[in-house]
Amino acid sequence: MNKRKRQIIHAARQLFLDKGFNDTSIIDIISSANVSKGTFYNHFSSKVQCLIAILEEAREEIITARIEVALNTRPNDKNVLQMQLALVAHVHRRQNLIQIFEAIFKNNEPELKQVIEKQLIREVEWLASRFIDVYGEQIREYSYECAVQALAMIQHSFRIIAMVTKQLATPEDVVNNVLNHIEGMLAHLQKTNSILITSDIFHALHEKAEETKITSSMLVHQLEGFTEKLTPDDLENGVEYANYLLKELQANSVNLYVMEAILPVFNNAFKDTPHEAEANEISIGIWRYLQIKKEEKNSPM
C-alpha cells in the first residue's frame, strides 16, 4: 500500500469516528487527507471502499500479530491460541473500530456485506485449523462447529458486558472462558456426533466467497520487485530474509513451517523503514499462501 493510500485511509478512519460514517463526505476525506480529488479516486471509487480498506488494514494487522505470537511456540499450546484470539479485541480497541462497526451493521451496501462475509469465513477457517492444532486430529469433523460457536460467544460476550458496565472485561478473560466452554462442547460432540456446521457446509461457503487464489508465481513477482528496491543502506538481515523467502518460493518443494517462522523476523527487519508497508503486505500474502498449502496437504485424497 503506498503512502497516499494509507494517508487517505487514516484520515477516513478518524472522520468516521468523529462525525460518523453517514455524515462524512468524500470531500471531508479529501480535505482531511490533504490530497486532490483525482488522487482519492485513483485509490477508491467510493466512501464504502475507504471503509473496506480500514477493515482490511485491521485484519492484516491481526494476521501479522498472530504470526509473531506463534513464533518459536508449539502449535498445540492453548495459551498461544488464547493470545491470538484476544488480539482481535486489542486491535479493534486500539484503532477505535467499535464505533465504525456500529455503522457497518446499519449499512446494506452489497460490496461491504461481501467483504465482511469473506473476513468471517477466513476467521472461521483459521480458528477451525487452530482447534485441530490444539485439541488433535480427532476433532477435525467438529472443528468448524466449534469455531463458529466460539466466535459467536466471544463477540456477544463483549457486547453484553459493554451494555451493562463501562468496565470492559479483558479480551484474555473472555477468550479463556469461551475456550473452556469449547472443551466441554467438544466432549459432548464426540459422544453424540450431533454436528450442525459440517465441513461440507463450510466448504460450500468458502467456494462462494473465494477470492483470487494466491500463487507462488504472484508472490515471486512481488518479492522480486521488492528486493530490487533494496539498497546497501537497508539492514543486511532484512535483505537476507527477503532473498531466502524468494528462493523458497521458487523451489519445487516449499518448507511451510520454516517459511512461517521466517515471516515475523522478515517483517520486523523492515519496521520503521520506507519498506515497512510493502513488507507487511508481502508477509500477509505469503501467510495466506502457506495456509492454502497446509489445507491442501491435510485434505483427504
Image (cartoon, rainbow, N blue to C red):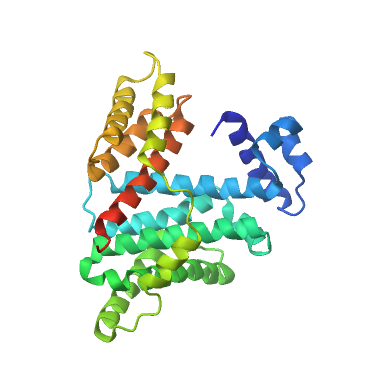
Q: Where is residue 188 shown, x and y percent of the image?
A: 29, 82
Residue at the farthest bottom position = 192
User: Residue drawn 61% across and 34% down?
Assistant: 5
Judge whether residue 15 can be spotted in this image: yes
* Residue 300, picture quadrant: bottom left
Residue 61 x/y as whole percent = 46, 45
Could you tell whether 234 is left or right of 75 in the image? right
Q: Is residue 264 above or below residue 98?
A: above
Q: Count the marks.
A: 0
Image quadrant in which the C terminus is located: bottom left
Q: Name the quadrant containing residue 181.
A: bottom left
Residue shown at 75% from the left, 34% from the top: 31
Between residue 190 and residue 151, name the one nearer to us.
190
Q: Is residue 219 left or right of residue 241?
A: right
Residue 140 place in picture, x, y as percent: 27, 69
In the rendered image, the vertical position of residue 182 relative to residue 248, given as above or below: below
Residue 141's place in the image compared with 14, above or below, is below
Q: Is residue 216 above or below residue 16?
A: above
Residue 99: in sight, yes or no?
no
x then y, percent, for residue 78? 26, 60
Residue sitting at x 32%, y 38%: 263
Residue farthest to the top?
232
